[in-house]
Amino acid sequence: MKKFLSILLVLAVLPVALLVVITPMDSQKQYIFGLISIGILCLMGLSKKRSISVIMVVMSVLLSTRYIYFRLTQTLHFNSEIETILGMGLFLAELYVWVMLLLSYLQTVWPLKRELVQLPDDMELWPTVDVYIPTYNEPLDVVRDTVLAAQCMDYPRDKMKIYLLDDGKRSEFAVFAADAGVGYITRNDNAHAKAGNLNHAMKLTNGELICVFDCDHVATRIFLQATVGGFLKDPKLALVQTPHYFYSPDPFERNLSVGRNIPNEGALFYGPIQRGNDNWNATFFCGSCAVIRRSALEEIGGFAVETVTEDAHTALKMQRLGWGSAFIDIPLAAGLATERLVLHVIQRTRWARGMTQIFRLDNPLFGRGLTIQQRLCYLSAMLYYQFALPRIAFVTAPLAYLLFNLNIIHSSASLVFAYALPHLFLAVYVNSRLNGRFRYSFWGEIYDLVMAFHIALPTVVTMLFPKRGKFNVTDKGGLLDVGYFDFSVVRPHLIIALLLAAGVVAGIVRACAHDYFGVDPRVIVLNVGWGLYCLIFLLAAIAVARETRQTRKTIRIDVDIPVLIHYASGITSRSQTADLSMGGCRIVAPDDRHLNDEIEAIELLLQSGAITIPVQTVASDEQHIRLMFDDIPLSRRRELVRVVLSRADAWIHPPKPQDNPFRSLLTIVRCVFDLFWLTWKSRRENRRLRAQHAAKVAQEESV
């Protein structure tokens, strides 16, 4: 009965919605209609109810659809072939954004907050788990702590086996695995890269569940206890995915002055999107930090090898056969983010190529087994990575009029703005409400612009030739001794930015002398504003290429642990840590003894016992002492991993403040200011250093 009433309600509302979309208005009436819509939306925004959010989504969809209908029926009349090509290209880009807006609302309007399923008290009922840690060319320093963290997971030893899957066939890894007491698996070839590595391990192991960690992802102690229970409750559950949390900053967080004040680039996907996918039983497997039922994998022939994004394709195959999936929105493991922008570009290009391959080779819209909602969730992910050409179209479109006097939107500036304003305002406002703690307004444009010029060609080529391309491993764990500006990554951005700057200047000149040039000043103002908007975002994207130094190998974590300080004189003092890492710690100075008496070792006093670590003093003041750890045995390092990286709450942090679109836009403007300020400051410093060097050389020559 409830379903029947819902259908009746939709049928009753549909004619009204159709009228909202197709009713034509002149600019004055459209301004009034748009402002009324914005006012209603703002009033509704005072309520935090989920049902109100749904109504706001419907309003946003209607106003955006109205804008697209206006563009389709009133603005696509052109005077030349070049205007037709450019104008249709821009309209198709807008159509793409409209489709992505609808799909994103489907995913995020009603996210599922899944509760943990407790394991039974009788451990005999717990399933056996094989933990796979695949590696290829990563250094042992990166892999070691991942293996040790896996050993720290709270799970019966007789029901958990850990395997290091080394496609690099390195002897030091085999020795480490033997010393650590974990299995070591290698193979004769590297066919199908990571997916082939995992499939080879499946043939040699027999656990009921398979847990996969990338070689830089360290698990918390409760990882298996938090994820395995669902498999006992639901025999058709094939996949439990957890977020990818990164304890090191990505290029945006490290290279931008405001980077640490905004949510991580992946927070939107590993928050509202995956929770929304979970609501439709469409959780994606993300390649790591996940548990999969072996029987489900065996039914689809193992991990998918047809594409370079084996993870998402594997989940799609299982869900086609009716297997269920789940997403637990708790960070239970943490890994390394890409250190440099060029590595970030390489990684995202592989993702874009892989999702395009799936779109061509195993399109979710076709074939059996998926619900409509599952098909649309997968379609959203695959279409997202086609953003390159639309983004390029948006940032270059103002140049058509500003530099070449081409009209690619045939309508008055007033009417275009009257239709576009409510469409854009509602889209920004509603997305800020739904996802405001996970993605700040306008930052998605920065992330996309950084990538757009790099993935445009790979996605087009893959769309035409889906079987081309190979798996590329993302390098992690590197250091950067000196900062530099990576021109190679943003060269196309710089070219377009210069053209936009020239276009804006030309537009201002034409606006000031509009009678002489015979142009409508309102059209010029609209295009100049559009060009300035694009220029600001391009410059912010360019600012990400200013690579800053990365000299710390391990992350510091604020943690208060009692310690005993052992001095060279034989005296011991009690204190506590201020922060702790795998390479050292900062402790509170109990007195001024450390100024005259060398510290030889410290004892970390844990609930499980004490860990004695030899140390060297790096720096100190009256309040704190900075210590560096000397080499310690593997058993002690495992305990240190348990304390630093594997605590149950190690990666649970307060959410970011709610988004404010205006404030978010100001942070982007600040990034542009910092780009010029820091560039000038760096050049001044370089000139000073060169002058000092020249003076020193001249002085030496005079002597």
Image (cartoon, rainbow, N blue to C red):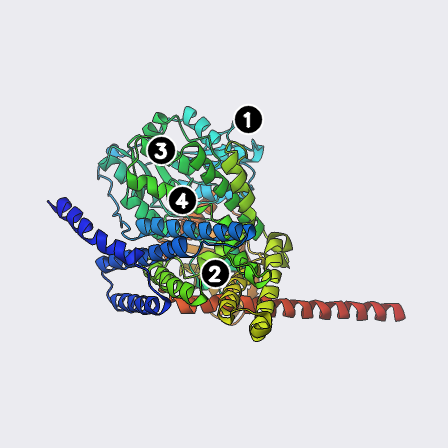
Q: Distance between the residues labelled 4 and 1?
A: 32 Å
Is 565 situated left or right of 428 in this image?
A: right
Q: Nearer the viewer, mark 2 or mark 4?
A: 4
Instruction: Give the label on residue 189, or none.
Output: 1
As drawn, the residue found furthest toward the left would be 1
Of mark 3 and mark 4, the one earlier in the sequence is 3
Position of 342 relative to 441 (above/below): above
Say if mark 2 contacts mark 4, CB within 8 Å: no
Q: Is residue 31 visible?
A: yes
**Looking at the picture, how far across and down is residue 417, in whole percent?**
41, 65
Of mark 2 and mark 1, the one earlier in the sequence is 1
Q: How far apart are marks 3 and 4 (CA)?
A: 16 Å
* Residue located beneath label 4 in the image: 381
Helix, strand or loop for disc 4: helix
Q: Distance between the residues labelled 1 and 3?
A: 34 Å
Q: Which amino acid does label 3 sit on?
A: Phe
Q: How crowded is mark 3: few (under 14 residues within 10 Å), some or many (20 or more)?
A: few
Q: Which of marks 3 and 4 is in front?
A: 3
**Looking at the picture, how far across and down is residue 60, in whole percent?**
31, 58
| Quadrant occupied by the N terminus | top left
Observer-nearest of 283 and 565: 283
Q: Which amino acid does label 1 sit on?
A: Asp
Q: In which quarter of the image is residue 263?
A: bottom left
Of mark 4 and mark 1, the one earlier in the sequence is 1
Q: In which quarter of the image is residue 283?
A: top left
* Residue located beneath label 2 in the image: 565
